[in-house]
Image (spheres, grey):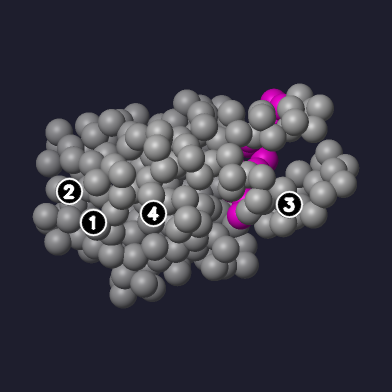
């Protein structure tokens, strides 16, 4: 990181230890409709923005609901969790503060809206560390593409070559690489099924931020 000027972080599963909450929300959401959570559902919707995930869910399960109704239900279930419960991943705060103190600009690139990520980051004491934010509602394609990372870099006034993207899913690594970013894969148990692919394609892979913090 000493040669770079910017670090762009995914949120869920990368900075926040939140993927268990999303799996629980998905399970509760489908259970309310008499549907068991399929094994591949979380994997399918994780790279998507809200609109795409809602459309996919409605189509897959033949729901008689609008995308707006589906999204509203998700948001209502998740707001309390992000506001009151979800912690940072171990070592993340120390690493963010080290980067900030080293003059590296920080950004978030997430599928979540400010309504969710701002309370979570504020409660964990790191919201003020970030120089820019970008979410998938602001771009036309999901995280298999570079759009959201390019937007985050633009808001940092940096080029992709000057930034590293931190991601816990393979689609995110692929999208960032396609945009010309260096990448760091971050271990999360909910993306362990694609860990080999992440390790193969990312420039670096860490199981904990303590690996980076102890190396500084």
- Element type at marker 1? helix
Q: Position of residue 169 (x, y in %)?
A: 51, 41
Residue range highlighted in magenta = 37-49
Question: x, y percentage for residue 43?
Answer: 63, 36
Mark 3, residues whose alpha carbon is within 10 Å: few (<14), some, or many (≥20)? few
Mark 2: secondary structure: helix
What residue is at 12 percent from the left and 56 percent from the top?
Answer: 102
The residue mark sitting in front, 2 or 3, is 3
Q: CA distance from mark 4 to mark 2?
A: 17 Å
Q: CA distance from mark 1 to mark 3?
A: 34 Å
The mark found on residue 69 in the picture is 3
Q: Which mark is residue 159?
A: none
Which one is in front in this view, the residue at disc 1 or the one at disc 4?
4
Q: Are marks 1 and 3 in contact (CB under 8 Å)?
A: no
**Residue 173 visible at all:** yes
- Residue 169 belongs to the span the image colors magenta: no
Mark 4 or 2: in front is: 4
Which quarter of the figure has residue 214? top left
Q: Earlier in the sequence, mark 2 or mark 3?
A: 3
Q: Is residue 73 left or right of residue 9?
A: right
In-image side of 74 versus 154 (left or right)? right
Q: Residues within 10 Å of mark 1 (few under 14, many from 20)?
A: some
Which residue has dot 1 on it?
Answer: 129
Residue 72 rendering spot, x and y as whole percentages: 65, 51
Work out which quarter of the rendered image holds the C terminus and state it.
Answer: top left
Q: CA distance from mark 4 to mark 3?
A: 23 Å
The numbered mark, 1 or 4, whose residue comes first in the sequence reads: 4
């Amino acid at each position: 990181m000493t040669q770079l000027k910017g670090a762009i972080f995914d949120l869920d599963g990368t900075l926040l230890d939140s993927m268990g909450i999303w799996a629980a929300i998905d399970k509760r959401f489908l259970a309310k409709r008499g549907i068991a959570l399929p094994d591949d559902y979380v994997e399918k919707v994780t790279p998507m923005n809200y609109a795409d995930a809602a459309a996919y869910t409605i189509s897959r399960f033949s729901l008689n609901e609008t995308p707006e109704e589906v999204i509203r239900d998700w948001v209502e279930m998740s707001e309390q969790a992000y506001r009151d419960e979800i912690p940072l991943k171990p070592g993340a705060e120390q690493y963010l503060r080290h980067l900030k103190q080293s003059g590296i600009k920080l950004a978030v690139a997430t599928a979540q809206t400010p309504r969710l990520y701002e309370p979570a980051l504020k409660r964990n004491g790191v919201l003020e560390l970030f120089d820019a934010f970008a979410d998938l509602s602001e771009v036309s394609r999901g995280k298999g593409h570079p759009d959201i990372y390019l937007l985050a870099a633009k808001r940092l006034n940096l080029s992709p070559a000057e930034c590293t993207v931190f991601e816990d899913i393979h689609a995110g690594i692929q999208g960032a690489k396609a945009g010309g970013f260096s990448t760091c894969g971050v271990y999360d148990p909910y993306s362990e099924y694609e860990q080999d692919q992440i390790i193969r394609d990312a420039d670096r892979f860490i199981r904990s931020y303590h690996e980076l913090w102890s190396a500084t």
